[in-house]
Amino acid sequence: MEDKITLAHGSGGVQTNELIGSIFKKHFANPYLTADDAAVLDMTPGKIAMSTDGFIVSPYEFPGGNIGKLSICGTVNDVACMGAKPEYLTCSFVIEEGFPVDKLEEIAAAMGKTAREAGVNLVAGDTKVAGKGQVDKIFITTTGIGHIIEGAATSGAFAKPGDKIIVTGDIGRHGCTILLARNDFKIDADITSDCAPLAKNVEAVLEATKDVHVIRDATRGGVGTVLYEIAAESNVGISLDSEKIPVQDGVRGVCSMLGLEPLYLACEGRLVIFAPASEADKILDALHACPNSEGAAVIGEVTEENQGKVILNTAVGAKTFLARPSGELLPRIC
């Protein structure tokens, strides 16, 4: 096997087969992985959730993960947010000519490991090689599918006044990690991406109660953008307690230095959950018992007033509108 990706690796010939056999089959092995034109899958009757997402993060490796881990987490979490149990994934690679083969193997290994952790099978894929300069190192697209858990019904349009708003852990770490990894600001801080698959966390919540109105993955735009989207979809107001929003000290420090709002920094392992107040304790207990959500907390509630708006209640008792961001905060965080 050569040590760099060449155009021949995307031609469909001997080198392509060698690449698939020595890297992708090695790390993605499962009974459903196919060499045919499409995978044949076992799917029981019922509603399904399906999602697809592209990943072009720069840099492609960062503290806490790489583009491979990210590509599995992103799609698994999107499917899970619809109250579904993710079952199968497909993936597509666009790789720049000259990309190191050992780095590709690290990415594939991270994908296989994360898929097994999430309980999903990678079943089919595609590989293309672009000429030097036609793509920035490596892009990955993943598509996921899974069955809706019986009794679950979640949507950004289902938020109701009186709902409690829960985040599954401290916010903004992924966006902050990518910012620091680029080293544009020469800031040294011990911050690691929160990138994690959360399907089992959602399952635990739905085992505790089916009375959950909204589950959303706070990725690009962070928790703040998700809250504004839900407020608009459900035509409700949102009231947040600024003191209860969990932010790691390092992230808070970087945000203070650069004038950033942690609510608008991307997460890749955090969910925002809306549910009736009567169910909040059950949901928190379920989340606290799962990896990657031990720090789950209630950060606010849904209101009838201020429809379409997000209000921050500050430590000194003041109320202020959460300003909506414009422009590009952090390009290419996923």
Image: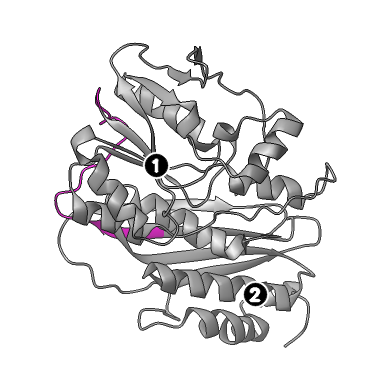
In the image, is residue 154 part of the stretch drawn in magenta? yes
Task: Pick the residue in front: 282 or 88.
Answer: 282
Depicted 12 relative to depicted 261: above or below: below
Identify the residue at image location x=70%, y=38%. Answer: 253
Whether residue 84 is visible, yes or no, is: no
Residue 32's spot in the image, x, y percent?
Answer: 36, 79
Depicted 308 relative to depicted 97: above or below: above
Task: Pick the residue in front: 168 or 69.
Answer: 168
User: Going by the image, does 153 lie left or right of 182?
Assistant: left
Amino acid type for the residue under numbered disc 2: Glu
Q: Main secondary structure of the magenta part?
A: loop
Residue 305, by quadrant, is: top left
Whether residue 41 is visible, yes or no, is: yes
* Residue at the spot of label 2: 106
Magenta segment range?
A: 144-162
Quadrant location of the N terminus in the rendered image: bottom right
Residue 12, by quadrant, is: bottom right
Depicted 85 relative to depicted 218: above or below: below
Any mark on residue 297, and which?
1
Bin the neighbour count of mark 2 within 10 Å (Cα to Cα): few under 14, some 14-19, many 20 and up.
some
User: Going by the image, does 224 lie left or right of 175?
Assistant: left
